[in-house]
Amino acid sequence: MILVTGGAGYIGAHVAVELMNRGDAVLILDNLCNSSRTTVQRIAKVVGREPGFIHADVRNRRALDNVFKEYPIEAVVHCAGLKAVGESVREPLRYFETNVSGSVTLCQAMADAGVFKLVFSSSATVYGDCAQMPIAETCPTGQPTNPYGQSKLMAEHVMRSMAASDGRWSVGLLRYFNPIGAHFSGQLGETPTQTPNNLLPYLLQVANRERDVLRIFGSDYPTPDGTGIRDYVHVMDLAEGHLRAMEFLREQTGVHIWNLGTGRGYSVLEVVSAFERVTGVTVPLAFEPRRPGDIARCWADPGKAAGQLGWTARHGLERMLQDAWRWQCLNFPRIEPREVVLRSIEQG
Ligand code: NAD
Ligand code: WQD
């Protein structure tokens, strides 16, 4: 049985589905601070059987001990965490407590229970403003400019030191680039509970006429069209990466770092025009100054994951946008005329 912390969240839910589709038993542990039980029901609907679910906090050592006592957990995928950059600036202690202390508590409980296989949701944010593109795992980690990024880098350090001190650990640090998209069924996707910070959820709300305009943060970057370039990766490809990492860690000990990205970057304007092309929906834009802390360019060299895990992202940008839009239309229906929505669903 595999424990997926944060399994009611965006990425964890897709990982849980893919683990279950492979035949694994999955237990989700989530405190539901940024998700809801509905997602667990949706996972059951998509897969055709229910995952286990424990409503608990990764900072709660007693709850974790009980889980490891009661269930035959062989490995953990640790997705639970807080991820809003702006919020992390306002509430740094909450971020360090959840993302760092929560990870320490989880690792302590795992070690005491004799469970030494761990896949961790890390982030390309740990590279900071990397001078070299594409970014390989050998690039030095940078100095993340916000407590969120710092907490991810600190959690990585915790896990590296831990594995260096005890050879029984098998740890995969998965550095996600920019996960977007949704489950192909339209039944699972990202459900922002606050005003979205990230490009895609914001764009989807504008396209759905829940917001007036997409603000483009910066049009004077040293990029071909002046807007920021990122490596967007389909959440289903990302989920598959976790499965491959887990297989690798069954055979290998130590700490292994893999970038999960496509290796191709798209600018904000390219994302918007691809979205308009695949959905037929126009997105009103407003150009604004750069967002503090943003970098101009960030895309992965995914060669290590390809070589060691046999993993490459299979879905291109248009597919990511189509799947995200299907999720948005089915679950947050607003836009008229309905034909636009139906057309994009049929295309999927
Ligand atoms: P999410 O908020 O949708 O999911 C995180 C889940 O963790 C939520 O269900 C939340 O309720 C749960 N959680 C938070 N604190 C918890 C705690 N103390 N105990 C138990 N559960 C807790 O976010 P996501 O996009 O699915 O991100 C998952 C992980 O991937 C996070 O660790 C995030 O930092 C990392 N990550 C995300 C992105 C991204 O762009 N989405 C990029 C890189 C890394
Ligand atoms: C992408 C591009 C923006 C919103 C952040 C975190 C990072 C990671 C993913 C978890 C940039 C532009 C955005 C908008 C815009 N999370 N943009 N208008 O900044 O690459 O990374 O999320 O680890 O840690 O820092 O992603 O989606 O916010 O932005 O113009 O309303 O879209 O400036 O160029 P980012 P993003």
Image (cartoon, rainbow, N blue to C red):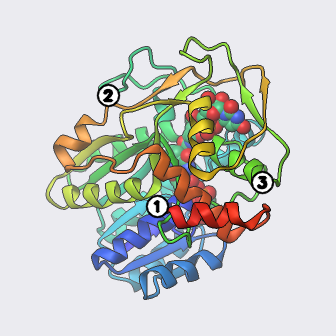
Q: Nearer the viewer, residue 143 or 312?
A: 312
Q: Which residue shows up at 43% across the image and 70% down it?
A: 16
Query: Which comes sooner in the sequence, label 3 or label 2?
Result: 2
* Residue behind mark 3: 194
Q: Name the quadrant containing residue 136.
A: top left
Q: Tell me where residue 224 sits by quadrant.
A: top right
Q: Amino acid at mark 2?
A: Ala
* Residue at 70% in and 44% down: 93
Residues packed near mark 1 inside 10 Å, few (<14), some (14 to 19) or many (20 plus): many
User: In screen coordinates, is 116 left or right of 13?
Assistant: left
Give the amino acid type for the residue marked by disc 1 in the picture: Leu
Secondary structure type for disc 1? helix
Q: What residue sits right under mark 1 in the picture?
A: 106
Q: Residue furthest bottom?
A: 49
Q: Quadrant of ligand 1?
A: bottom right
> Label 3 vs label 2: CA separation?
33 Å
As helix, strand or loop, the secondary structure at mark 3 comes to: loop
Instruction: Please give the name of the residue rendered at 79% of the width and 64% of the height, measured from the top-left corner.
Output: 334
**Which residue occupies the extreme right position in the image?**
212
Eyeballing the image, is 18 above or below 176?
Answer: below
Query: Which of pointers 2 and 1 indicates the residue nearer the eye?
Result: 2
Q: Is residue 244 left or right of residue 96?
A: left
Q: Amino acid at mark 3?
A: Gln
Which residue is found at the position 77% from the left and 54% from the top?
Answer: 194
Cα–Cα gap, marks 3 and 1 = 27 Å
Considering the numbered disc 2 on the image, is that residue within a helix, a strand or a loop? loop
In this rendering, would 6 be left or right of 197? left
What residue would you read off at disc 2?
Answer: 136
